[in-house]
Structure formats: C-alpha cells, structure tokens
Amino acid sequence: MTPDLIDLEAPPEPVFSPQPSPGARVNYTRKADRPNDSGLDRDADLMLRVRDGDHASFESLLRKHRGPMIHYLRRLVRNEAVAEELTQEVFLRVYKSRGSYQPSAKFTTWLFRIGTHLALNWIRDGRNEKSQASLDGEMANGIGRQVPDCRKTAEQELLYQVKLREVRQAVSSLPAKQRAAVRMHKYEEMEYAKIAVAIGCTEAAVKSLLFRAYEALRSRLAHMA
Amino acid sequence: MSCPQEFLRSQELIVGYSAGTLDPQDTAAFERHIQSCAVCRQETVLQQAVWAALDEWRPVALAPGDS
C-alpha cells in the first residue's frame, strides 16, 4: 500500500484576513514585491510593508497570527504561559529580521518554522525545568498530584513530529516522477523493471530517477544522520 | 556523489545495500569497498539515515487505515 502524503502536523491556517491599514505607507522597493505582480500572499505583502517601515502592518500580522501561534506552541510545549512567552519571542524575531525579509516562502511557513525552532530549543535547553520545579514545589507543599513526569515523553514526541514533518516535506518536494519512483521502490518494494513499466520509462531511467531522488533526500535529511 | 575509486555501480550499490536487496556477493564486495572509500562510506551512512527516516515516517502516514 502506498502511503498518503498526509500533513499530520500542519500549523493551523489563520482564518482572519485583515485589510491593510488605511493609513499604511506602501513603499515597495521592487516592482516584483507588488502583490498583483508576484502573486504574494497577503501576509507576505504585509511583511514587505513592515520591512519598509509600516508598523501598522506588523500589528495586523500580530493580531492575525498571535492566537494560532499560541495554540500551535501550546501543543508543542504543553504549557500555556510558555507558549505565550515563545509567541512573543517569535514576533520579536520576525520584527528584528524585517530588514532582511524576502518572500521566498509562504509567510506562515516561515512564521511557524520560527515557532517550531523556538519550541524545540526551549525543550532541548531544559528550560522546561522551571515548570517542573513549580510542580515539584506543589508536591512539597502537600498539594501532591498524581501526574506522571511526561517531560521526556513530550520532548521525544516533539522531536519525532519535527522529524516526520521534515521527512514528509523532503519527499513531497521531490519532482513527481522521483516521488513516485521512491514510493514504489521504498514502500512497495518493487523491482526496477516493474517500476519502469509503471512509470513508462526504461529501467536505466528508473535507476537514474531513484538515485537523483535519494541523493536529494540525503542532502535534505543529512542532519538526521 | 562521485566515488574517487570509480567503484562499479556505486550509486546503485549504496541504495541496494541500504535497502538490503543486494545479493551476498555484491554485499561483500561493497563492504570491502567502503572500508577504503570515504566518499561511498559517507554516502552509505547518509543513505541509511534516509532509509531509517523513511521507515519511521511510514507507519504514521498509514496510521488511519493501517490498524
């Protein structure tokens, strides 16, 4: 059975799409930055305005994405206060990097990537020990709760989800024929000759496709080695 | 990837070795080769990591209908 490329951990898509502030200064530095010319999503358009000094656009982005970001981070760190703190840090980093912003990817992809990195760093750095200490304090004060220490489990789960996401994205980003060849070779365990029939090319072409695909995956997933 | 020793079919062997589909003769020959070829050895490590990552990804992707 061929696996479906299901986005199991996609960040939530914002549902509110604000209009630009009436008084917002629009100062595109390049013609390609203009939304009608380049097909940029509205968020990227707003971010370009932030880059050009429009603080109202930053507030629009903050209003639009703060809630979904907190929700997303809360699922990762399992702590409301930390999720809010990390969300502040996400937007701080967005603002600090406004000068070098280039809309090379969808804005929300970039935004939630920052959030994921911050959450991962927070867990890796053991900054969640503060929360654990708080729980320990409650226990010492006789407020004992029968709560298992799931810190390690949360970290493992996060790392696992991040890894799955990276793998899925790496496979999804392959050209269609390479992706199909990998699916048949890796998951269906089909021989080169049968893959060649299925794809409609020669066996040599299948090998070439697979080697290029695996080389691309090696490159994109090298950090997992 | 370029094998400095121009080992025959090195790419195909790296993939086959990682997938466990090589016959014993090719497996032995390839293992001898990667003892002396750092490029193929490194590529093999990376390919095995990709293989393991793809293995790990599959059960989650199939989970809804795989019970």
Image (cartoon, coloured by chain):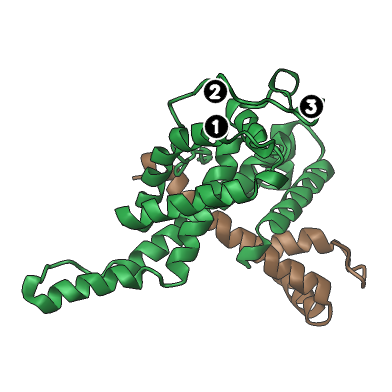
Chain colours: A green, B brown
Amino acid carrying label 2: it is Ser
A12 vs A33, left or right, is left
CB under 8 Å between discs 1 and 2: yes
Front residue of A176 and A164: A164
Q: Residues within 10 Å of mark 3 (few under 14, many from 20)?
A: few
Label 3, label 2: how far apart the Cα atoms are: 21 Å
The location of residue A50, given as percent across then percent down, is: 63, 36
Q: Chain of mark 3?
A: A
- Asked if residue A10 shows in the view, the reply is yes
Give the residue type at disc 1.
Ala
| Viewer-nearest residue: B5 or A54 | A54
Element marked by disc 1: helix
Q: Quadrant of residue A42?
A: top right
- Above or below A26: residue A93: below
Distance in Å between CA atoms under marks 1 and 2: 6 Å
Chain ID for label 2? Answer: A
List the residue tagged with mark 3: A32
Residue B39: numbered disc? none
Is disc 3 placed on a helix, strand or loop?
helix
Mark 3 vs mark 2: in front? 2
Asked if the residue at tag 2 contacts the one at tag 3, i.e. Cβ–Cβ closer than 8 Å, the answer is: no
Q: Which mark is residue A56?
A: 1
| Left or right: A139 as drawn, with respect to A69 | left
Q: Residue A33 sits in which quadrant?
A: top right
User: Which residue is disc 2 drawn over?
Assistant: A21
Does residue A164 appear left or right of residue A46 in this picture? Answer: left
Picture coordinates of residue A65, whole percent (x, y)? 46, 37
Look at discs 1 and 3 and give the one toward the viewer. 1
In the rendered image, residue A110, in percent from the top left (x then y), is placed at: 59, 44
Q: Tell me the kind of residue under disc 3.
A: Ala
Q: Chain of mark 1?
A: A
